[in-house]
C-alpha cells in the first residue's frame, strides 16, 4: 500500500504506550492496533485529529505517501 502509517514512530518519540494512547484518544486497543499496523482501510478525520492532539503532531507525522514503484 502506498500509504505508510507511522503511528508507532510518533508514539515512541512521545514515549507513549498503546494503552495510554487508547485511553487519551478514546479508541479501543484493537482499533488503534489495526491503525498502527497499517491494516486500516480508512481513518476518520475526528480520530486523526484526536491522535494528533494527544501526540502533539501533524497528520503528516503519522501518515506518509510513498507511491508505488513501476516495474
Image (tube, rainbow, N blue to C red):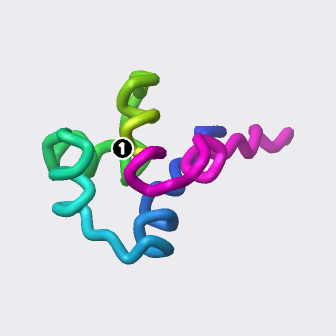
- The structure residue drawn at horizontal position 26% and vertical position 51%, both measured from the top left corner, is 33
37 vs 13, nearest the viewer: 13
Task: State the extent of the magenta-drawn residues as a range.
Answer: 52-71
- The structure residue drawn at horizontal position 44% and vertical position 56%, both measured from the top left corner, is 55
Describe the element under mark 1 as helix, strand or loop.
helix
Q: Where is residue 4 in the image (x, y as percent from the top left)?
A: 58, 47
> In this figure, which residue is indicated by the disc labeled 1?
35
Residue 28 in the figure: left or right of residue 21 = left
Residue 32 in the figure: left or right of residue 41 = left
**Few, some or many residues within 10 Å of mark 1 (<14, 14–19, 20+):** some
Residue 69 in the figure: left or right of residue 6 = right
Q: Where is residue 18 in the image (x, y as percent from the top left)?
A: 24, 62
- The structure residue drawn at horizontal position 47% and vertical position 45%, both measured from the top left corner, is 52
The C terminus lies in quadrant: top right
Numbered label tally:
1
Q: Which residue lies furthest to the right in this view?
A: 70
Amino acid at each position: 500500500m502506498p500509504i505508510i502509517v507511522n503511528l508507532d514512530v510518533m508514539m515512541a518519540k512521545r514515549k507513549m504506550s498503546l494503552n495510554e494512547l487508547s485511553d487519551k484518544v478514546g479508541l479501543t486497543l484493537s482499533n488503534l492496533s489495526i491503525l498502527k499496523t497499517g491494516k486500516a482501510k480508512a481513518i476518520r478525520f475526528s480520530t486523526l485529529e484526536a491522535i494528533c492532539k494527544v501526540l502533539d503532531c501533524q497528520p503528516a507525522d503519522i501518515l506518509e505517501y510513498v507511491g508505488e514503484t513501476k516495474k
